[in-house]
Image (cartoon, rainbow, N blue to C red):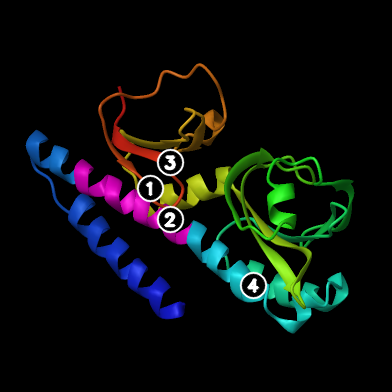
Amino acid sequence: MCRKIVGMLVVCLVLLVTAFGCGGNKHADKIDTNIGVSALVALADNHISSYANGLDTLAMTQEVQSGDWGMMFGLLKNVEEAQVTGTMWFVAPDGSYSTVALGKTDTNLSDRAYFPGLMAGNKVLGDVVFSKSTGNKSLIAASPVLRDGKVIGGLGASIFLDDLSKTLARELALPDDMVFYATTEAGDVVLHSDTQLILETCLNLEKDVEFETSLLTGWRFALGFKD
């Protein structure tokens, strides 16, 4: 998994240098934007998939399969600190859950749309919610935890959309006259270089942009110049 992530980062770096390391005229800027949106998608997908792939691996560890928060906490804390943004959590079949940031919470996830599927043994990736424990706008990734063929809970990550947007802007070294955003199939803004616009409605999004759809999330990414 480490080699895959390193390989993705190398691809992202090449795309970034190609997109933002040259210029000179408006036609060149157009070409750069076309390449740059591919770099944007690659960077976003890399951050999201690093969480999702890591959950699959962690769900098979002895600590997580114990179902005991005290046993798994140290492992999850170390993994979370190595990530860019978000918090990790474990949810029991009754919907009660604990997070690395807060420990055991007094809220319940059983009413989340993704919860029945997760408890049925299905992976989760792409649900966008307001976190019950923090209030943060979050992308959910989660893997079922099985022991002796039975689902004993779910291991998840809430990837904070505000923080992910800031990370992408920093990694792109986005010029002041440029903007990026990403929308779901339903048109909800889930990432934006202006984080105040995430999950806001009735937005007039910039039109002078290049688009590319992520095969991982299905989100439509845009990168271009401010109106």
Q: Is residue 4 magenta?
A: no
Local SS, label 3: loop
Q: Which mark is residue 45?
A: 2
Q: Residues within 10 Å of mark 1 (few under 14, many from 20)?
A: some
Would you say the residues marked 1 and 2 are in contact, meaning their CB atoms lie under 8 Å apart? yes
The residue lying at 9 percent from left, 42 percent from top is 24
Mark 2 and mark 3 lie on one chain; the one further toward the N terminus is 2
Per the rendered image, the range of residues in magenta is: 33-47
Which type of secondary structure does the marked residue at label 1 adopt? loop
Choose mark 4 or mark 2, whichever is in front. 2
The residue where tag 3 is placed is: 219
Check the image and name the residue furthest to the front.
149
What mark, if any, has residue 179 been given in the picture? none
Name which of mark 1 and mark 4 comes first in the sequence: 4
Q: Nearer the viewer, mark 1 or mark 4?
A: 1
Q: Tag 2 or tag 4, which sits nearer the N-term? A: 2
Give the distance between the C-alpha atoms of the residues marked 1 and 4, in whole angstroms: 25 Å
